[in-house]
Amino acid sequence: MEKIRTRFAPSPTGYLHIGGLRTALFSYLWAKKNKGEFIIRIEDTDRERYIANADQELIDTLAKVGIVSDVEVKHQSDRLSLYQKASDKLINNNQAYKCFCSPERLDKVREEQQKNKQVPKYDRHCLNLSKEEIDKNIQAGQKFVVRFKIPDDEIIVGQDAVYGKISIKGQDLDDFVILKSNKFPTYHLANVVDDHDMRISHVIRGEEWMPSFPKHILIYKALKYNLPTFVHLPLLLNPDKSKLSKRQGDVAVEDYLKKGYLIESLINYVALLGWNPGNDQEFFMINELIKEFSLEKINKAGAVFDITKLNWFNAEYIRKIIEQNDKRFEQLISNTEKFLGKNAHKAKKVLRLFGSRIDNLADLGEDSKFLFDLPEYDKEMLIFKKSDFEKTKEGINLALGILGKIHHSEWDQDTINNSIKDIIAKRNLSPGDIFWPLRVACSGLERSPSPGELLEFLGKEEALSRVKKAIKKLS
RNA sequence: GGCCCCAUCGUCUAACGGUUAGGACGCCAGGUUCUCAACCUGGUAAUCAGGGUUCGAUUCCCUGUGGGGUCACCA
């Protein structure tokens, strides 16, 4: 059997899109599952939209999430002769022709057709130019494009691994351009020529390519290439069901990385958009995805990119990593540092404190502020809703006394909690009379990690100072 | 508008003719508890509509409706 070869072929016109990530991931998974090859190819045939370095950034972002090309990354702009040759061949076979129509004329024709409520379509003005006319035009320095000649009496049938049989009448197709006047190929030509040249077995791409699928089939046939398996992926959608786009939220993978979403959660979540494992498993590490991935389980309907579920995945992964406390935790710590600014050295402790309370690492900066800089708070806040002024005052004073007696070397939440519980029992107070004011004293907040955790984090000196401050407020 | 594709809880999805239509996120309620988070328990909520085919349709077929994609010398 032929070796499985897939490719991800972005054009360097911007950053990596979430949808692009999903496409790249599925291609990658399918190749790896079959012990095949995954290839990245840069489709830089549009010199007008080209963005310098975008190709490298695309490659870098993919590498960050673990998706790497098995062969050297090639650029289509380096391979122009290949497309030229294919184009020549099609012209020679009378399956393509040179077109000298100016953009102005094309615009006019299109405008006219729209006015008459016709479908905009090239009018084949140059289809039957004589050899003499063509030579004359070229000699006069006239620019031309090469158009594919659509067999308009044919019905083109395509087979897709996800959508099944797709058929369309030739007459509904336009004589599309395959070679631009600057000798660069269009997507249609370059894509087909390269996929054939690189012996791609599965063309995995977004559903937005469906309309041009028949064109590609026609080129394959005209060039006498074997057809690869086509796999069109359902679209990723905005909450309003339109194609996932900027303006309704972030779509760049880098944006999510910057906000402190983990690679694991991004990959895991995106893998489950338009694909399912056929059972209830939700958590997948990359190797499990490779093992379980299958084309049959790809869905047809578009999938809304739902940030709340991504948040859940991310929160789960953060908790798991902290719990496991291994090498990945060390990585998470250094990843966390950049969100803490000057408090980066406390990253590990901050993570331990907030790891189960955040959706993404970017939340950490804001959430942990009070640890380093006690906010102002109202003294009323110190009194627990089921307590009163006197009991609160008694409680926190007792706390101060106990805490003062705990030695620096024993300053940890277990010791602290045990001592406090002790005194609560002895004095017949309720936990709220003492834990609550301690929390507020330490945080200035009503919602926070537990007092024990906070006291430990702050250290004896800072902790006692905050407690004293609270007592002062009450007196 | 032409062409193409799609259609199960709000969202991601399972059920390859027979299920009380399942799971997850979210949301709600309760438990735990000094608060929040986590955790545990429970609940909420869906087969777009109408026709067929069939003993039986979420599932197959048709029509309608709805949504989306695409109609460039962009990919």
Image: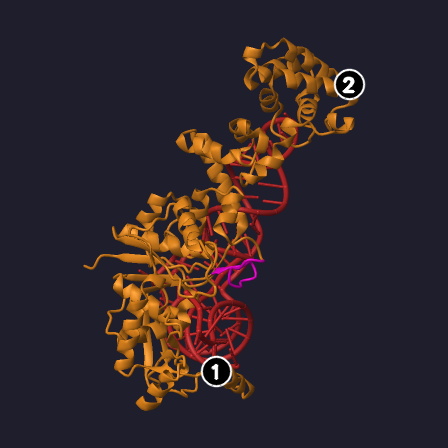
Q: Which residue is mark 1?
A: A106
A19 shown above or below B52 = above
- Nearer to us of marks 1 and 2 is 1
Q: Position of residue A44 (x, y in %)?
A: 40, 62
- Quadrant of residue A42 within the rendered picture: bottom left
User: Do callouts 1 and 2 point to residues on the same chain?
Assistant: yes
Q: Position of residue A155 (x, y in %)?
A: 33, 81
Q: Which residue is mark 2?
A: A472
* Residues at marks 1 and 2, CA–CA distance in whole angstroms: 82 Å
Res A130 visible = no
Q: Which residues are magenta?
A: A236-247
* Of residues A365 and A185, the one drawn nearer to the viewer in this rendering: A185
Q: Tell me where residue A170 appears, x and y as whole percent.
A: 36, 82
* Front position in the image: A467 or A187: A187
Q: Amino acid at mark 2?
A: Lys
Instruction: Look at the image and give the colour of chain B.
Output: red
Residue A203 is one of the magenta-drawn residues: no
Compared to residue A227, the image places residue A364 above or below, namely above
> Where does the image place residue A434, in percent across and percent down from the top left?
68, 20
Characterize the local packing of mark 1: few (<14), some (14-19) or many (20 or more) Cα atoms within 10 angstroms: some
Closer to the camera in the image, A37 or B31: A37
Residue drawn at x 65%, y 30% is: A370
Q: Residue at x 26, y 81 (%)?
A: A92
Residue A240 lies in magenta, yes or no? yes
- Which residue occupies 39% across, 51% down? A59
| Badge 1 vs badge 2, beta-carbon distance below 8 Å | no
SS assignment at label 2: helix
Chain drawn in orange: A
Please report whichever mark, 1 or 2, sits nearer to the chain's N-terminal start: 1
Amino acid at pointer 1: Leu
